[in-house]
């Protein structure tokens, strides 16, 4: 029994060795950092900035949701924290200007999920990738820049296409 526990959890080459080691050393720090970020009001700053940039455009609240999720994803790396911070404001605003409720929730969920692949603070998988491949975390960050930009650009374009199709309104400055 002890040999099984040693193989599964303790050894660095065990099944759960590297993920457990990464969780114990790195992820805890980013969970604490994310909690401080949300409590300090920095998330609200990113939301206000995104609304200032995209609000007056066609489908602005949905576009603000995408931009705010990208901003917040850069510093939190957590989809759950992202939804809790931006979704409480952007989903009702999207519904108010004419988006369907399901579409509004889907935009927020998709945009917030992108926060886990947005450098420099990425989700737990980035640390595990770096540890398994035995490369620096910076290498993983650099490799993630283009996919993250393409992800958010795709969600932004889809929101714009839905705004055209649904004929949603603009919000006032």
Image: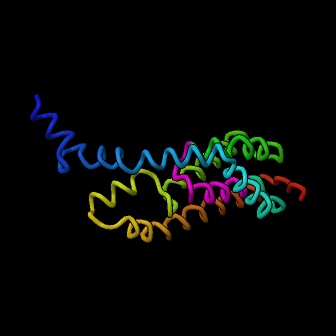
Q: Residue at x 29, y 47 (%)?
A: 21
Quadrant where the image shows the N terminus: top left
Of 148 and 2, the residue lying toward us: 2
Quadrant where the image shows the C terminus: bottom right
Residue 96's quadrant in the figure?
top right
Of 150 and 72, the residue lying toward us: 72
Q: How is the image coloured?
A: rainbow
| Left or right relative to 96: residue 69 | left
Q: Which residues are magenta?
A: 62-80
Magenta stretch, overall SS: helix
The answer to whether residue 16 is seen in the rendering is yes
- Image x and y of residue 147, in percent: 49, 66
Q: Residue at x 72, y 56 (%)?
A: 64
Give above or below for 132 relative to 8.
Answer: below
Number of numbered discs overlaid on the protein picture: 0
| Left or right relative to 124: residue 133 | left
Q: Residue at x 69, y 53 (%)?
A: 65
- Image x and y of residue 126, in percent: 40, 57
- Image x and y of residue 27, in percent: 42, 48
Which residue, as the protein is rendered here, is positioned at the far right? 172
The answer to whether residue 98 is magenta is no
| Left or right relative to 134: residue 74 | right
Q: Residue at x 51, y 44 (%)?
A: 32
Give above or below for 92 relative to 70.
Answer: above
| Left or right relative to 114: residue 139 | left
């Amino acid at each position: 029994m002890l040999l099984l526990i040693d193989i599964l959890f303790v050894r660095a080459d065990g099944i759960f060795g590297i993920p457990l080691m990464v969780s114990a050393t790195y992820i805890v720090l980013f969970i604490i950092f994310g909690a401080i970020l949300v409590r300090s009001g920095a998330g609200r700053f990113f939301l206000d900035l995104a609304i200032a940039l995209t609000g007056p455009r066609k489908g602005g609240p949905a576009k603000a949701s995408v931009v705010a999720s990208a901003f917040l994803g850069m510093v939190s790396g957590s989809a759950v924290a992202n939804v809790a911070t931006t979704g409480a404001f952007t989903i009702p605003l999207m519904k108010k200007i004419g988006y369907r409720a399901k579409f509004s929730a889907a935009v927020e969920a998709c945009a917030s999920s992108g926060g886990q692949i947005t450098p420099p603070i990425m989700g737990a998988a980035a640390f595990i990738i770096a540890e398994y491949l035995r490369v620096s975390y910076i290498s993983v960050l650099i490799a993630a820049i283009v996919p993250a930009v393409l992800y958010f650009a795709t969600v932004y374009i889809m929101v714009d296409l839905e705004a055209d199709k649904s004929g949603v309104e603009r919000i006032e400055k």
